[in-house]
Image (cartoon, helix red, strand yellow):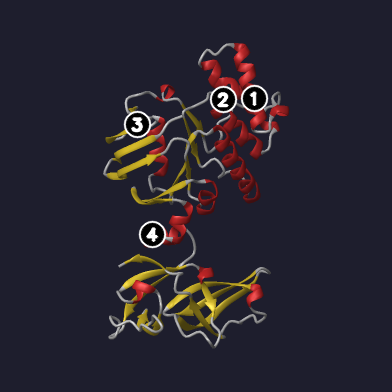
Amino acid sequence: MASIVLDDMVKCFGDLTVVDRISLTIEDGEFFTLLGPSGCGKTTLLRILAGFAVPDSGDVRFGGKSIISTPPHRREIGMVFQNYALFPHMTVADNVAYGLKARNTPNSEIRDRVASVLASVLLDDYADRYPRQLSGGQQQRVALARALVIRPHVLLMDEPLSNLDAKLRVSMREEIRNIQKTFGITTVYVTHDQEEAMAVSDRIAILSGGKLQQVGSPWEVYFHPANAFAAEFMGSCTLLRVEPGADGDTEDQRGGTVTGFIEQTPVTLRIGRAARAPCTIMLRPDWIKVAGPEITENRFSGIVRESAFLGAAILYQVEALGKTMRVDVPAPQTNILKQPGDVIDLYFEADRPAVVAP
């Protein structure tokens, strides 16, 4: 297996810079995801790792050794493509064996390794079938088995679940995660799906416009985004400008609160340092709660514009503080369903907001 280092990577297509001075270190055995919208540079980075694209500058190292001039077939990588790229005229076993035959592996070893890897992806009873006889999930596992059977140092996966339906994507991402951990292969995974990235990854790199926005664990990038783009890309949220009032530099030592403004609306603030210096905070929908009469801190009012009861939760669209914000309320919290036009009193707890900008 191998660690991966991308050092000051740059790639341009004409006047367009699609990878803009990106440096990353991926640990040996790590499941690392490149996440971002279309055109952010994530697939180009993966192609550079595979050797299918040549960077304009920068270096790539596997296990401390530069592979920038090494052709793809000598990089010891396994690749799982978005469309699986299975050979329709070959059986499952022959598809999986293809890379071994290209390496002149002895037939007896090919049989053993193919049988072993098909068992690991739960396809040992499908060896003699053709791709057309398989479901989308089974085809995806064949593609994964073909990549694993050569025992690569690095596994690269380019949006491998995008062609599956929603239910199958959930089950397959769990299988991919389990298989990757079983084999312990350093894996670089490309997706634009935030939930998928959080479900499978040890760490995530968020990209936008060819630039690296943040690297961290799923927990870190969700709860502590580095900037507004990372905050909004990782899921629904509301960004609010917070400013201390005229007495904002004198904290109430008894209650730990200050008078301040959220989007120019006076509010009694209790959010630590964020209440004492102008900043932008982020709130996820489930961090905003319905306020009872006893709540005085971080409290504000709004008008319900839409409401939906989903059993386990009530989803509101609320116009408040000059914003339209989503508020997710656990259904057991209240037996009252607010209707469009109703006033609703809301608050957030002091430790919830994430500061995303000064």
Which residue is under mark 2?
149
Question: Residue farthest to the bottom?
Answer: 293
| CB under 8 Å between discs 1 and 2 | no
Could you say where residue 226 lies in the image, as x and y percent from the top left?
37, 58
Could you say where residue 12 lies in the image, as x and y percent from the top left?
29, 40
Quarter assignment of residue 113? top right
Could you say where residue 16 lies in the image, as x and y percent from the top left?
29, 45
Q: CA distance from mark 2 to mark 4?
A: 39 Å
Neighbours of disc 3 within 10 Å: few (<14), some (14-19), many (20+): some
| CB under 8 Å between discs 1 and 3 | no
| CB under 8 Å between discs 3 and 4 | no
Amino acid type assigned to the residue bearing label 1 in the image:
Ser
Which numbered disc, 2 or 4, marks the residue that appears first in the sequence?
Answer: 2
Residue placed most toward the observer, 46 or 3: 3
Which residue is under mark 1?
116
Asked if 78 appears above or below 33 in the picture, the reply is above
Would residue 90 be visible to someone looking at this image?
no
The secondary structure type at the circle numbered 2 is helix
Could you say where residue 179 lies in the image, as x and y percent from the top left?
59, 36
Q: CA distance from mark 3 to mark 2?
A: 23 Å
| CB under 8 Å between discs 3 and 2 | no
Query: How many labels, in total?
Result: 4
Residue at point 66% right, 68% down?
A: 312
Which residue is under mark 4?
229
Which numbered disc, 1 or 2, marks the residue that appears first in the sequence?
Answer: 1
Residue at point 69% right, 25% down?
A: 127
Which numbered disc, 1 or 3, marks the residue that appears first in the sequence?
Answer: 3
Q: CA distance from mark 1 to mark 4?
A: 44 Å
